[in-house]
Image (spheres, rainbow, N blue to C red):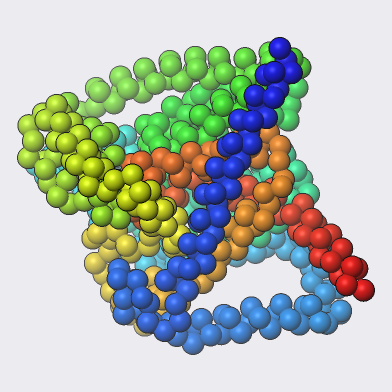
Amino acid sequence: MQKIYHKISEKILKITNAFFGVFIFLVFYFALTSPNLTLGDNVNKQTIGDRTTWVVVLFLVTLILVTLITLVNRKIRVISRVLFIDYGLITGSILLTLSFILQLIVIFHTHPAIGFDPGAIHDALLDPNREDLKSYFSYNTNNLPLLLVQRAISGGLKNSSWLTFDLINSLLLLVTVLLNLLTVYLLDKKSLKVTLYIHALWIVVFPMVLVPYSDVAILPMVSALLALYALTSKTKNYFVILLSAIGIGIVVTCIYFIKPSAIIPIIAIFIIEIVMVTKKNIIKTLIIIFVIFGVVSTSYVYLQKQLSQQNYIKIQKNRTIPAIHFVSMGVSGDGGYNPSDALAMAKLKSQKEMREYSQKKLIARLHQKGVFGYLKFLIHKQNKNSADGTFGWLIEGHFMQTKPTGNGLKRLIQEFIYPGGKHLADFRFISQVWWIGLLGVIFLGWQQKNRYLNVLRLSITGGFIYLLIFEGGRSRYLIQFLPLFLILASLIYLPTIKLLTEKLAWIHASNN
């Protein structure tokens, strides 16, 4: 019986890894062919008119020269090895610290007002009695928990400025990075150096710190979930396992209330734990699963009660937009936000009418596309969902209305990330190179496999599938899954480089 279960488990893992392989190949290909890499005028209809400048030329020349000099000059290779490998922990820590200092400089010189959903939340902090805001949160009750959290923070600090919440975002990113470092430390201490470098580069090219919304707010929770699971994976102490499982349950509940789609990793954890269960770890697996379920159930009831009793902003109950609306919207256009659908939801009187309208729209859109048309659409949507290394910066409707102002350093920073900025296309290009590098490591590291890596890959696959089914159409929704990508790339980088080096050495030897 055990042998049969083992064979079934192996087949399930092969199927899930095959799905991941297909997804990561497509994402890597789409990233390589992204309009963000266009030299000169950007050909993307959403960013047309942005032109790369001497900054990209300097970036490419520097990248090529450093690579060639390091390969050719033995003395430089030795210095690089000592600096970045032998003293990698010190160098990596310094670079990571500098990246956060740079981020703070950016925040203090920008902190612009943001539109779309973050703008609605910020406005509600200032005036919760506005009728349009009451209507917004009646339909989008998923953002109500974040509003209440931000209200508690602004009340405690007696400050609700964009600068304050951008600084809080930076703190949340710091916590995310530290938790990711802890996860890698628990699983493979040798990978800690490369983890520092990967995260330092990420922080430099991540202006979403300027957007106080659930995309960033959820990151430390996802990282905490992954860190706690890593702890349960490495320890044999049942008391530690119990505490970790309780922690996971609390974190999962918080994730659900802030950004429900980000609970996908816990689903992947359950699947992998069940699929890879053995006689040796069955007790441990059962403890983890049952404790998590128990904690989630009790904490969910408590938080839901608190949410239903809130009186900060009056909303119309049972006006929440149903999930099928986002499925229907995810089949229109590029698979993203559809203003016509959103307007229709506002006009309908009940959730029943909303569901019926969305269901009819969904069926009509699927029928119009047909089987092959829908498959073609999914491939196109996967491109839109994941290829952009800026994670949809400025792509969202009413994202940011401001333009570069001032002089000196302030003006220079804003030219890189503000609408109409002279170096905006340069920023897109450099961010895209970082994203391609991260995806390249993940793509080439397919041979590295273990229980934790299986969880990361299945979680990423689940995230891709979710975004294909529901509203997507831009890579901003991928931000919630970034800890998965960052940790996966960190853990497989060294063994992947070692494997590639061995393969290249073998080819070189055969040619001689």
Image side of residue 67 versus residue 271, left or right: right
Q: Seen in the image, is 61 located left or right of residue 401?
A: right
- The quadrant in which residue 327 appears is top left
Give above or below for 333 relative to 341: below
| Residue at left offset 35%, top offset 48% | 372
Q: Residue at x 49, y 45 (%)?
A: 481
Residue 178 x, y percent position in the rendering: 61, 46
Percent coordinates x, y for residue 228 in the rendering:
61, 31
Residue 118 or residue 508, whichever sits in front = 508
In this picture, is 477 found above or below 259?
A: below
Near-viewer residue (483 or 44): 44
Report x, y in % for residue 320.
20, 32
448 over 424 or under it: above or below: above
Q: Is residue 234 above or below residue 200?
A: above
Q: Tell me the quadrant of the picture where the C terminus can be found.
A: bottom right
Q: Quadrant of the N terminus?
A: top right
Q: Residue at x 11, y 43 (%)?
A: 344
Relative depth, front residue between 76 and 341: 341
In this rendering, does residue 122 appear at all?
no
Q: Position of residue 260 (x, y in %)?
A: 38, 34
Q: How many marks?
A: 0
**Quadrant of res 81:** bottom right
Residue nearer the viewer, 329 or 98: 329
Q: What residue is shown at x 63% (from left), y 47% (from top)? A: 488
**Residue 17 seen in the figure:** yes
Q: Is residue 52 left or right of residue 162?
A: right
